[in-house]
């Protein structure tokens, strides 16, 4: 989004103020700290996001004023996305008036693409309306393979291959924004939905992992963050949560993805590990070891992806992403009924992958068993 628009239209500002305050008459608009113009024109020329504007209006025969404030469009400091800036402004409106002595927030709203202003001040929670998608979640395929003791069909292999091809296609789209790559790596370690949020969700009294061990995992992941965050040229289009519950298959290899998460741009290893970890997880559930049909699917997925992308450097940055996904499937919150033996093998994989400089897809069994 550009930092400036052509004008802040007087008619739109007046319409907005009437929606909030009722019958008012707009008197003037000027950039805060500057003298108001003698004559108000159709709009504020050179209006820019991030500049505060003084608005003077008349209500019930009395002159009142308010400051219209937005956030500057910028990269870094967690303000990269439109949703980041919306989060800050919504939070400010919700909390300003609960602090004694704080300036009052009168409303929170948004600019439309055609220059309009709309109020969201009465919002309690937000929602998303999406188109209906038919099909079955890919996890039902994995459950069926587990039920058949790891036997896979030709269709299973084709579906794995088409998922690798899909990721290879979207990951080809690159983006130059170093701050976003650094943020992606930082968020993978420190965000509440990712590694540190997951470790915080593990109760203190577990028999298979202690708070001290979870702390050590976090420390290793911070080390990995500093190893890989400089590879900003790898920033590419990602899904961000590419797991079997977010993939809907219809007939054959026709599918749709759901619930894209955590930003438009990221690290390809995030998507690759998100799906690949599930083949490891299901192999362990089915056979107690990384063998059988799920191993075949894992190897076919990696082989096709690397064949199409030639991105072998991914194997040098995928480690913390695998840790993230291992913490998900080993979680006592999401998967409370796993055996101690299975959890032990998952944590073996987690500990060991943190120690390898380059992940080898053909040596997963060694990482699990050692």
Image: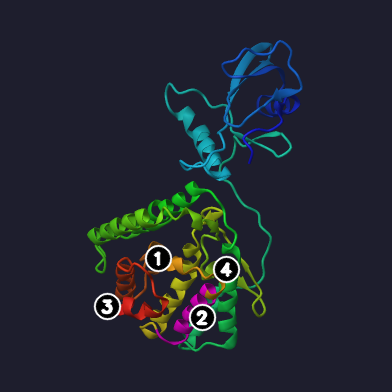
- Magenta extent: 291-306
Secondary-structure class at tag 3: loop
Q: Earlier in the sequence, mark 3 or mark 1?
A: 1
Q: Residue at x 68, y 63 (%)?
A: 132
Is 184 or 21 nearer to us in this picture?
A: 184
Residue 261 placement (x, y as % from top left): 53, 56
Secondary-structure class at tag 2: helix
Please say if 179 is above or below 64.
below
Mark 3 and 2 residues: CB-CB less than 8 Å, in contact? no
Is residue 362 one of those drawn in magenta?
no
Instruction: Please tell me how crowded label 2 is: few (under 14), some (14-19), or many (20+) other residues with Cα within 10 Å.
Output: some
| Residue 206 visible in the snapshot | yes
Q: Residue at x 26, y 69 (%)?
A: 208
Q: Which residue bears the numbered disc 1?
A: 316
Q: Which residue bears the numbered disc 2?
A: 300
Instruction: Please tell me how crowded label 3 is: few (under 14), some (14-19), or many (20+) other residues with Cα within 10 Å.
Output: few
Which image quarter holds the C terminus? bottom left
Q: Which residue bears the numbered disc 4?
A: 168
Q: Nearer the viewer, mark 1 or mark 2?
A: 1
Q: Earlier in the sequence, mark 1 or mark 4?
A: 4
Q: Earlier in the sequence, mark 1 or mark 2?
A: 2
Is 125 or 300 nearer to us in this picture?
A: 300
Secondary-structure class at tag 4: helix
Q: CA distance from mark 1 to mark 4?
A: 17 Å
Instruction: Please tell me how crowded label 1 is: few (under 14), some (14-19), or many (20+) other residues with Cα within 10 Å.
Output: some
């Amino acid at each position: 989004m550009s930092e400036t628009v052509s004008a802040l239209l007087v008619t739109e500002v007046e319409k907005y103020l009437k929606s909030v305050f009722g019958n008012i008459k707009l008197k003037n608009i000027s950039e805060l700290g500057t003298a108001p113009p003698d004559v108000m024109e159709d709009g504020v020329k050179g209006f820019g996001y991030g500049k505060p504007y003084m608005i003077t209006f008349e209500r019930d025969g009395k002159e009142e004023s308010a400051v219209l404030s937005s956030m500057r469009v910028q990269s870094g400091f967690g303000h990269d996305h439109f949703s980041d800036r919306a989060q800050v402004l919504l939070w400010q409106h919700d909390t300003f008036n609960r602090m004694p002595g704080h300036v009052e927030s009168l409303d929170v709203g948004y600019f439309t693409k055609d220059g309009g202003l709309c109020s969201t001040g009465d919002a309690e929670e937000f929602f998303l309306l999406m188109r209906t998608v038919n099909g079955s979640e890919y996890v039902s395929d994995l459950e069926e393979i587990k039920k058949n003791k790891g036997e896979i069909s030709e269709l299973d292999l084709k579906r794995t291959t088409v998922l690798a091809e899909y990721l290879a296609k979207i990951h080809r789209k690159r983006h130059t924004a170093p701050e976003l790559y650094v943020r992606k790596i930082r968020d993978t370690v420190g965000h509440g939905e990712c590694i540190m949020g997951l470790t915080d969700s593990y109760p203190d009294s577990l028999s298979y992992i202690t708070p001290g061990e979870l702390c050590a995992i976090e420390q290793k992941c911070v080390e990995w963050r500093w190893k890989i965050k400089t590879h900003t040229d790898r920033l590419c289009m990602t899904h961000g949560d590419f797991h079997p519950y977010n993939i809907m298959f219809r007939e054959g290899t026709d599918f749709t993805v759901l619930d894209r998460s955590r930003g438009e741009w990221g690290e390809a290893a995030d998507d690759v590990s998100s799906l690949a970890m599930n083949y490891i997880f299901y192999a362990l559930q089915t056979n107690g070891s990384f063998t059988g049909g799920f191993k075949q699917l894992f190897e076919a997925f990696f082989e096709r992806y690397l064949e199409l992308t030639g991105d072998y450097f991914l194997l040098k940055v995928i480690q913390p992403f695998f840790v993230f996904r291992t913490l998900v499937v080993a979680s006592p919150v999401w998967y409370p009924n796993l055996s101690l033996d299975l959890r032990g093998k998952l944590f073996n994989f987690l500990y060991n992958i943190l120690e390898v400089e380059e992940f080898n897809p053909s040596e997963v069994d060694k990482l699990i068993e050692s």
